[in-house]
Image (cartoon, rainbow, N blue to C red):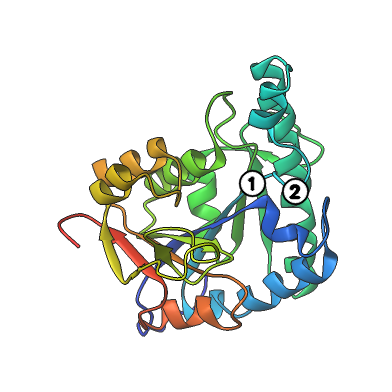
Amino acid sequence: MPVKSGKTRFRRVLLKLSGEALMGDKSFGIDQKVVEYIAGELKGISKLGVELAIVIGGGNIFRGLEASAEGMERTSADYMGMLATALNALALQNALEAHGMPTRVQSAIEMQELAEPYIRRRAMRHLEKGRFVIFAAGTGNPYFTTDTAAALRAVEIGAEVILKATKVDGVYSSDPVKDPDAKKYTEIAYIDVLKQGLKIMDSTAISLCMDNNLPIIVFSLMKRGNIKRILDGKKIGTLVKGGVS
């Protein structure tokens, strides 16, 4: 069991990574340097007494929604996207374990030679023992994104927060790359995210978090040390929560 330091802001968290985050500067696939960087950022978290679960997308390999728009049958396209998340999960598991962090991959679709089936109580037991758990294959259902899978799994395992890793340093009123007048929010309410159509996570995921009062912290993954700063209680990125921002 990990030593509970009592000094961290959260005890159990779910980290949401996009598949694109693993792509780095490549146009496709997995950049091993980026995977190693992420593993390095996560190293030592269990020693802080923090239990970490991870949901990872597959957009660096295959995007079901885009394939569907180009004529592929949506259900088949989404299942292919789920398989892409499994590839990313195995790559991240390999990097984490190379850094000495015991990790389990649990899949929402059966692939017994590669991953455990998703079983909620087993996942929670792994977390309690100080193992990282990577949830692959989304929810296991077509028409649901990995954002929704992250919200669902976070609620199921009793996570206290979702850490949404992105390429920007928080939530803005518009695209800060295209709009120099874009306003960054320190805090914003779930309902305002939905009303303004801000692309933090899809509307199903935001609604699920809102219904269960599960906060989301949106932050830059590429600024070294940000995850530890959040766990230490520092205000990093944007906090999405209930009430009026």
- Residue reaching furthest to the left: 244
Q: Is residue 161 left or right of residue 115?
A: left
The image shows residue 37 at horizontal and vertical percentages of 73, 74
Q: Is residue 174 left or right of residue 87?
A: left
Q: Callout 1 environment at 10 Å: few (<14), some (14 to 19), or many (20+)? A: many
- Residue named by callout 2: 60
The image shows residue 156 at horizontal and vertical percentages of 40, 43
Check the picture and name the quadrant holding the C terminus.
bottom left
Marks counted in the figure total 2
The image shows residue 100 at horizontal and vertical percentages of 74, 74
For the residue marked with disc 1, what is the amino acid? Gly
Secondary structure beneath label 1: loop
Whether residue 4 appears in this view of the structure is no
* Labels 2 and 1 touching (C-beta < 8 A): yes
From this view, report whether residue 91 is shown above or below residue 107. below
| Residue 157 disc label | none
Picture residue at 74% right of the left edge, 29% below the top: 80
Whether residue 224 appears in this view of the structure is yes
For the residue marked with disc 2, what is the amino acid? Asn
Q: Quadrant of residue 67?
A: top right
80 and 155: which is toward the camera: 80
163 and 2: which is toward the camera: 163
Picture residue at 31% right of the left edge, 43% below the top: 194
Q: Quadrant of residue 111?
A: top right
Secondary structure beneath label 2: loop
Picture residue at 77% right of the left edge, 58% below the top: 23
Q: Callout 2 environment at 10 Å: few (<14), some (14 to 19), or many (20+)? A: many
- Residue named by callout 1: 57
Q: Is residue 37 left or right of residue 217?
A: right
Q: CA distance from mark 2 to mark 1?
A: 8 Å
For the residues carrying marks 2 and 1, which lies nearer the camera in this image? Answer: 2
The image shows residue 218 at horizontal and vertical percentages of 44, 64
